[in-house]
Every structure is written in structure tokens, then in C-alpha cells.
Amino acid sequence: QSVLTQPASASGTPGQRVTISCSGSSSNIGDNTVHWYQQLPGAAPKLLIYSNTQRPSGVPDRFSGSKSGTSASLAVSGLQSEDEADYYCAAWDDRLTGPVFGGGTKLTVL
Amino acid sequence: QLQLQESGSGLVKPSQTLSLTCTVSGGSISSDTYSWSWIRQPPGKGLEWIGYMYHSGSTSYNPSLKSRVTISVDRSKNQFSLKLNSVTAADTAVYYCARGFGVLIISRFDPWGQGTLVTVSS
């Protein structure tokens, strides 16, 4: 059972916009920034969004992040086949005094 | 460009000690801006933070693993290491090393090593 809650799966057709949610509590998302990681099949996770909304250099602007209260969201617009991957949210947890991850969302491009 | 590479035994017997090393290239492990982390992923499951070492040499561990984990650094080799003792099958996972941004509150990890699969089996 992960501290941060994500839907197990999400899907969309090429060109569509898909959002993935990440739900937490006041001790993690409510009080700290959220980061998102993309894990392509067979690969290591890669930082996709940091500090709620920031994209590292090289990440397409089709990916965007937002946060409100104790929840955060990752949006992928103009969905492409290469976006098919697992996506994880992460945040610091004040109670656990360590970083916590969501259980991951498998994004399928139909 | 900073790169991290894990190395170590891929097969460990139950009750023994798992030992892994992460070699950092393209940057110094002694930077005071970053921490150096271990994260694992059981097959088909999500990510679990194991612990990290700050540039000062102090460490922080996941409370669920704290009694069994040691992270240490060898600055002369630009490496940091993980030891997990008394392993069981539940410790079977891909182990990643990663650079953490920040000093005290760290959940932003970039980049990550490619990961190494450690199987606990007799």
C-alpha cells in the first residue's frame, strides 16, 4: 500500500490529452512539492516534472504538472505512442521523514 | 553529464548481506548541493526509497529498513555503497542509485543509474 495514491492505469488515443492523479495528505503533498517520474519499459525512472510544475531540459512541453491542496496531477497532451510508460509521483513526507512514492500508473496509448 | 552505475552481486542467499556500489562519473560526489540515494523496485511493483547519504557523510534511512541498512561513501573513488543485511526473498528487487536534490527534504532524484537486479535465493 503506497502512501501516495495513483490510479493503476490510464489510457488514451494518439493526440488525446490524458491526466494522471496523485492523492496524498497534509504531511506529504499538502506541505511539500511533488515530482513526477516516467519509467519506460525495461528502463530506469527518469525525472519528468519537478517542484509541482517544472520540466527538466529536454522534456517536451506536452507534459505538465499541477498541484492543489493534497493532490497533484500530471497531464500529457498530444499523446504519442512513445508516452506509453509507468508514471510515478513522489513527495517528501513530514511524518515518515523521508520521500514517498505513488504506486505508479501504467499509461497505455490505444 | 553526470552518470551513475550500480555494480555488485546479483544473487544473494537468504540471511546474508546484499552489497552494492554506485560509481558516479561526470561530477563529484562531494558536492554540497546533493545527496546520494538508493531506491529499489520489486519485480512488477512500485518504487521504495531505501536511504541516502548527505554530502557531509551523515545518512537517513527508510524506517522500515533502518535496522538492516548501511550507506557509506568512498570519496577517493567517487563511489557510494549500500549494505542490506539479513536479506529475505522480499528484498528481491531492482536496486537503483540516484542523485538527490537538496540537503534535508529530498524527493527529487535525477539522474538515476540503470539499475541492477538482486535476487535473494538459496
Image (cartoon, coloured by chain):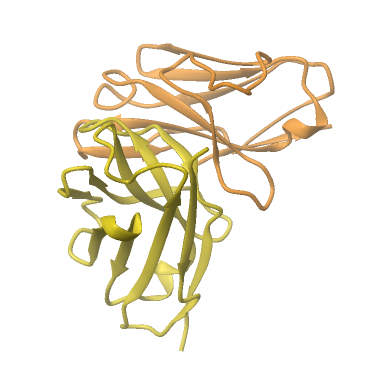
Chain colours: A orange, B yellow
User: Residue at the spot x=40%, y=50% of the render?
Assistant: B48
User: Residue at the spot x=35%, y=12% of the render?
Assistant: A69
> Front-most of A105 and B78?
B78
Measured along the vertical axis of the image, is residue B48 above or below residue B14?
above
Residue B8 horizontal/vertical position (percent)? 45, 72
Quarter of the figure with residue A26: top left
Horizontally, residue B29 falls left or right of residue A40, namely left
Residue reaching furthest front? B76
Residue A13 horizontal/vertical position (percent)? 83, 24
Horizontally, residue B34 falls left or right of residue B117, namely left
User: Residue at the spot x=37%, y=27% of the render?
Assistant: A24
Can you see residue A1?
no
Horizontally, residue B104 falls left or right of residue A49, namely left
Q: How many numbered discs, if any?
A: 0
> Front-most of B98 and A66?
B98
> Front-most of B1 and B69?
B1
Measured along the vertical axis of the image, is residue A95 above or below residue A64?
below
Can you see residue A64?
yes
Residue reaching furthest bottom? B122
Measured along the vertical axis of the image, is residue A18 above or below residue A81?
above
Horizontally, residue A6 falls left or right of residue B60, namely right
Residue B113 horizontal/vertical position (percent)? 51, 51
Measured along the vertical axis of the image, is residue A6 above or below residue A64?
below
Residue A27 horizontal/vertical position (percent)? 24, 26
User: Residue at the spot x=30%, y=18% of the render?
Assistant: A30
